[in-house]
Image (cartoon, rainbow, N blue to C red):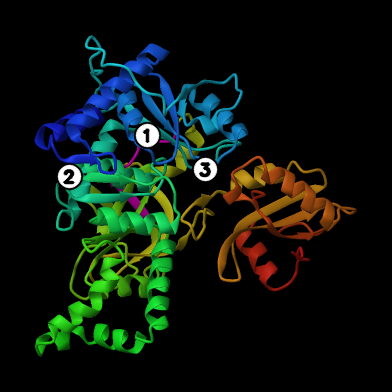
Amino acid sequence: MNMYQLLESTAKKFPDILYLVREEVTYTGFIDLVKRRAATLHDAGVKSGDVVGILSHNIPAFPITLFAIWYLGGKVLLLDTNLTPFEYDNMAQITKCKFVCAEKSFFYKTDNFTFIDITAEDGDVNQKLKPAELPDSEIATLSFTSGSTGTPKVVPLTHYNLTECAKSLLDMKQWISSGDILYGFLPMYHVFGFAVEVLATVQYGAGVLLQPTINPKELMADFKKYRPHVIPAVPRLFEVFRNKIIDGIKAKHKWFLFSFIIKHQKFLSKIGLGKLVDKVKQPVLDIFGGRAKLLVAGGAATKPEIENFFVSLGLGFIQGYGMTETVGPICISKPCKGRVPFAFGGPTTNNTVEIRDKNADGVGILWLKGNQVFGGYMNNEEANKGAFDERGFFNTGDMVSMDKNGELHFAGRKKQVIVLDSGKNVYPDELEGLFITIPGVKNVAVFEHKIKDKTVSYGVFSVEEGMTMEKLAAAVAAANKKVASYKWVTHFAMTTDDLPMTSTQKVKHHIVRKNLIEGQYPIRKE
């Protein structure tokens, strides 16, 4: 079964259930919109096998166009809306992308591909146009996972990978049912948003409430009006919600009473004061619309106190782990006795994990194998050599341990990927490749660092004599403009000493960071 066939199967089971909730479009109506968009794209020249980009916020046209490309037998290049024309051109050339369906605000002059207005109205269904007969081994999506410049890693995911991930999401069936509303403000070009808003909804016959912004007022208005059942978000947003809730209770001088009742709710319910507990909880639950059953966190680690707070309110809270290479959630936390917050669970159905090279604390490298694990990076044999073993297990490069419940705990990254508080990934190799071309820079190390309790991308530059902090700052600022703003390095230090290197002439990032903390490098003053 390919992705369009999965949609068609769900539409037959749940024809009258809303898929696009805000727009009041049922699954049957959505199929019609997909066929109309397919006719438009066909007339524009899109044919089976073509790579077609989508560059859009979370608007209805995104999923409509996504399924229309699959209807025609095309491959979808998922494009981050935060990048630059320089990056889009590079990504299109690498993937041989011919068309990009985008909102008009993203249009620019380019010779690399043809823009198609994703918001344009479609005509009638072309009755002669039939869905492509695609085997599930065909590529469905292409995503960049190591930056968009230099020599990036491009992840091709097949229809089989996607449909198997959709099946594995049935592991959450105690919380999700057909007809439920899943909130959709996470960008669909990112694997977390894609898995929840496209795969989970179509698998369950649920609806998606698309929201293109992260304006708190709009989120709260949506919660009040549409009352979603499932809310996915990065941990940082759940932390913001929790803090605002607590601040609001404290402003009414009710925090002591609230925290006392929540802490002792089991005892209070046992002695017949359950209604009091419910009365205290309800105003907080009403913030999310009053029907929320499940909060889903991913993209970064959730602090235990955040998870504990929402669980104490009676909400389900799932912490997931995944990568683009695994179509997102390949491990999810599961309800179990004595569950430890901060765990991200075990493997979903038809997937397997192994922890290798454990140290004395039981921490080792996480390896994955399963139906939703990709088959290898596109045209990058060098990267594939170290990515898989002879048994087909994929090396995540992440360090984990396992508790008595069989749940995994994140312990750190062997790879140097920087995960910002927003959940966005920054790849040091990409930035170092940009900065090393600056005249006067001998070498550079970019790594994750904390500045005033905020995770940032930090750079330490080894420079030639005569380079000043002012010259370097100007050159770094110019280089930053070639990539998305969330990747920018605005905190850095400079030294004329050589950076510590391995025998294979790779920078020892952990030593550089240690030297920085110990004050060995002059730091740029903001």
Q: Is residue 56 above or below residue 229?
A: above
Residue 196 among those drawn in magenta:
no
For the residue carrying disc 3, how many other residues have a C-alpha within 10 Å: few (<14), some (14-19), or many (20+)? some
Marks 1 and 2 sit apart, C-alpha to C-alpha, by 20 Å
Q: Check disc 1 and report its element: helix, strand or loop.
A: helix
On the question of residue 339 being in view, the answer is no
**Could you tell me residue 169's position as x and y percent?**
22, 48
Q: Nearer the viewer, mark 2 or mark 3?
A: 2
Q: Nearer the viewer, mark 3 or mark 1?
A: 1
Residue 369 among those drawn in magenta:
yes
- Sequence order check, earlier mark of 1 and 2: 1
For the residue carrying disc 1, how many other residues have a C-alpha within 10 Å: few (<14), some (14-19), or many (20+)? many
Which label belongs to residue 393? none
Nearest the eye: 385 or 204: 204
Residue at (73, 57) in percent of width and height:
499
Q: Is residue 235 above or below residue 36?
A: below
* Residue type at tag 3: Ser
* Residue type at tag 2: Tyr
**Could you tell me residue 400's position as x and y percent?**
38, 63
**Could you tell me residue 317's position as x and y percent?**
27, 64
Q: Which residue is mark 3?
A: 146
* Residue type at tag 1: Phe
